[in-house]
Image (cartoon, rainbow, N blue to C red):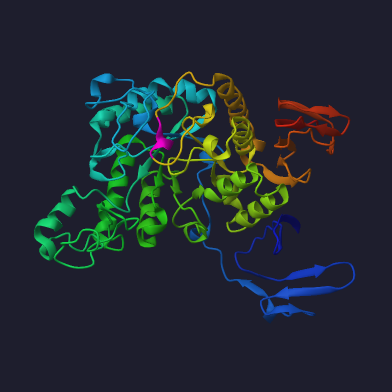
Amino acid sequence: MALVARSEACDWFETEITLPEKRFKYYFKLDDGREEVYYCADGFLEKPEETNAFFYPYINHYDLVELPEWAQGEIIYQVWIDRFFDGDPENNPSGVRSFDALPDRNTYYGGDFAGVIEKLGYLEEMGVKILYLSPLFYSGSYHKYDVIDYKRVESIYGGEEGLAALVRAAHAKGMKIVLDAVFNHCSDQHAFFQDVLRHQRQSLYADWFTIRRFPIEDRAQDYDSFAGLIPSMPRFNTDHPQVIEYLVGIAEDWTRRLGIDGWRLDVADEVSHALWKVFRQRLRNVKKDILIIGEIWNQAGRWLLGDEMDTVTNYAFMKWLRSFARGEIGAKRFWERMGANAMLYKTPIHTYLVNLVGSHDTTRNRRYVGSEKTHELMLMTMLCFSGIPLIYYGDEIAMDGGEDPDNRRAMQWGGNDSLRLRIAALGKLRSQSDALKMGKMVPIDVSERVLAFSRVYQNKRIFAVANFDPLPTNPIPVRRKTTLIFGHARTEGKTVSVPGRSFALLEENT
């Protein structure tokens, strides 16, 4: 068995076996060259018996993790529709502001589906294959996370016709569309919740929400809401069979009618497992290879057993990469944390974990790390890392922004073109590389301020080196001579050296 990860607490080893049988027994033999011991279902033993073995009683097809092949390792671009590009001023709401104006919690900028269509070429240049759109159903807020009507696409974005046109245009370029499923809560203006307020306990929808007491008088106390803090966003009772049928039916209908390719599930860990199990089964019946991404910030193993979600937002990657970038931890600690995080999930999921350096829920990464160059090195590390890299709109030009709502500024078109071109070149390279999309990742020990690793796929090996130190790296030994395919490095024989504050991607010569 090969060592695949190491943390402060333990090491993980892995191998692959192929058996004709669908049931088998097994145990582990540990041999350090001096003594042998066996790890069995009954613990550590000097001599194993069949009765001590671990037992896989039967492998059913339903137990297998089936992931959409088209999404593996591809680049996601998160589009905040209102803040991206105004392609059709005719559908703008009143009072839209200039894209140069800073946002507040009620600002509209006029971005729409037509604007996204107009910028598809821009995204194509970066190797983007998946567009994740911000919520787009009818709502009274700029952010649309408080849905009033799930059956109505926002007219200020171009309505259902505009969304259908975007899906067609994206598909024509080989891109996929992922919508945001806000199923944990809705707006207090939603017809069902309004019925509850009118009829109280007698409402047909009284059990559809998480209501603590009737009559509802103190809206901050009498029912649960998003984060338990926002009464204008009441929380659904997602255990209720009729709620499950309603919400899953909404996703089914839009997927079928428009050819939607995937869903990002908002606040996924607060919604019932019962709903997500039905969601997966029914959506897979509509589209066999649909992509299901859960927004989960912590350990997500319960949702990634193969019967709910395909992957989750890997905020652990963001957390530890940001800590490393700010000098709070070194490379050794970073790799220990990444190894421990990866081992929480089945191996096939590793190349599907959605990595990010920032999102609409975090301070902009450029602001957080305090340096454009550091931000650039982080983006480049992410674009070569195992998983699905997610670029939050504007991160490719190092847009600035503090906490919400400042992290949701309008896109600054034409800004920082030199950085954008470097990110686009690396993104395009990734989109054409099976090794970067699907390869096994092997960390390389260089120094505490350098993140270096190889990506290995079949007979291909690619090396990535992100030097966060102002000084150049010492010569890094490699197995064979290498060729620089991106960035800055000096190769000499079977060694590589990368300048200070620089990134390099190299390919092993075969």
Q: Magenta part of the protein: which range?
A: 405-409
Q: Residue at x 47, y 28 (%)?
A: 174
User: Residue 401 in the image: x percent, y percent?
Assistant: 46, 35
Residue appearing at x 71%, y 47% in the figure: 331
- When the figure is inspected, residue 402 is found, relative to residue 40, above or below; the finding is above
* Residue 482 as seen in the image, left or right of residue 368: right
Residue 358's place in the image compared with 29, above or below, is above
In front here: 58 or 272?
Answer: 272
Query: For residue 336, which quarter of the picture?
Result: bottom right
Indicate left or right for 332 with 76 as reference.
right
Front in this rendered view, residue 103 or 253: 103
- Quadrant placement of the C terminus: top right
Q: Look at the image and say whether residue 77 sits in the magenta stretch.
A: no
Which residue does the image show at 31% across and 30% down from the upper left?
A: 163
Give the left or right position of residue 71, taking residue 172 as reference.
Answer: right
Residue 457 seen in the current view: no
Task: Indicate the quadrant containing the N terminus: top left, top right, bottom left or bottom right.
Answer: bottom right
Q: Please name the predominant secondary structure of the magenta segment in the image.
A: helix
* Residue 23 falls in image quadrant: bottom right
Report whether residue 88 is seen.
Answer: yes
**Where in the figure is residue 254, as x and y percent of width and height?**
30, 40
Say if 214 sits above or below 329 in the image: below
- Residue at point 27%, 20% (across, down): 89
Q: Nearer the viewer, residue 192 or 225?
A: 225
**Image x and y of residue 204, in percent:** 14, 60
Image location of residue 498, percent across then percent down? 77, 31
